[in-house]
Image: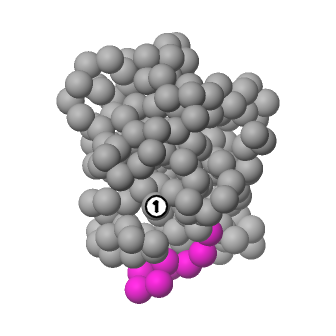
Amino acid sequence: MKFLIASDIHGSATWCRRLVDALDAEQPDRLLILGDVLYHGPRNDLPEGYAPKEVIAMLNPLAGTIIAVRGNCEAEVDQMVLDFPCMGDYTTILDPTATLAADGSPREKSGCELFCTHGHVWGAGFHNSVDHLPELPEGSILLYGHTHKKVSEPASGHPGVWAFNPGSVSIPKDGTHSYGIYENGAVRHVVLEG
């Protein structure tokens, strides 16, 4: 399984176009969106190319490939215009074929559970995300957004869980626009070119 992981598009048509280009280049099985799709939020400046209607027009044709969760900026009106579910606080995905650990080392046994969330309800405590997780099987990967900062490291206080934040597609708070790739149990960051 190969997933492209994106978070915090925040209505930027400019950066959503670059994300769609990355989808074409990467050819993932699914696009995982970790929240904050359309609205920029009251704490953020307008992102470059802010045009939520254009973002809707780019993402709706991909609805059959998108798995999304609710960010802190999603509202019921967003679900009314998006053709894919986006209001769940989390979802879990099981990859029974994964043979690598998130750090790239071989797994002792095959399989990996991905816990996908935004980071404001469930999270591992990095950069202002909440430190609140359900019990996850050892070897799980927590995929979250919210902080707009890339993370790929063990989740402190949650033994056996790897935390991965792809950073922000449109409003990075660590200097680079980015997304993530999950493949065969491992995760990595990819910087979007400006």
Q: Is residue 44 above or below residue 83?
A: below
What is the quadrant of residue 1 in the picture? top right
What is the quadrant of residue 58 in the picture? top right
Q: Is residue 80 above or below residue 168?
A: above
**Residue 109 left/right relative to 128:** right
Q: Is residue 42 above or below residue 134?
A: above
Residue drawn at x 31%, y 46% is 42
Tell me if I can see residue 28 in this picture: yes
- Where is residue 176 drawn, in percent x and y? 68, 54
- Where is residue 79 drawn, in percent x and y? 28, 25
- Where is residue 94 drawn, in percent x and y? 48, 51
Categorize mark 1 by other alpha carbons within 10 Å: few (<14), some (14-19), many (20+).
many
Residue drawn at x 75%, y 40% is 194
Q: Is residue 122 magenta?
A: no
Which is more toward the observer, 151 or 136?
A: 151
- Where is residue 23 drawn, in percent x and y? 69, 30
**Residue 99 left/right relative to 133:** right
Which range is magenta? 152-160
Reading the image, the residue beneath label 1 is 147
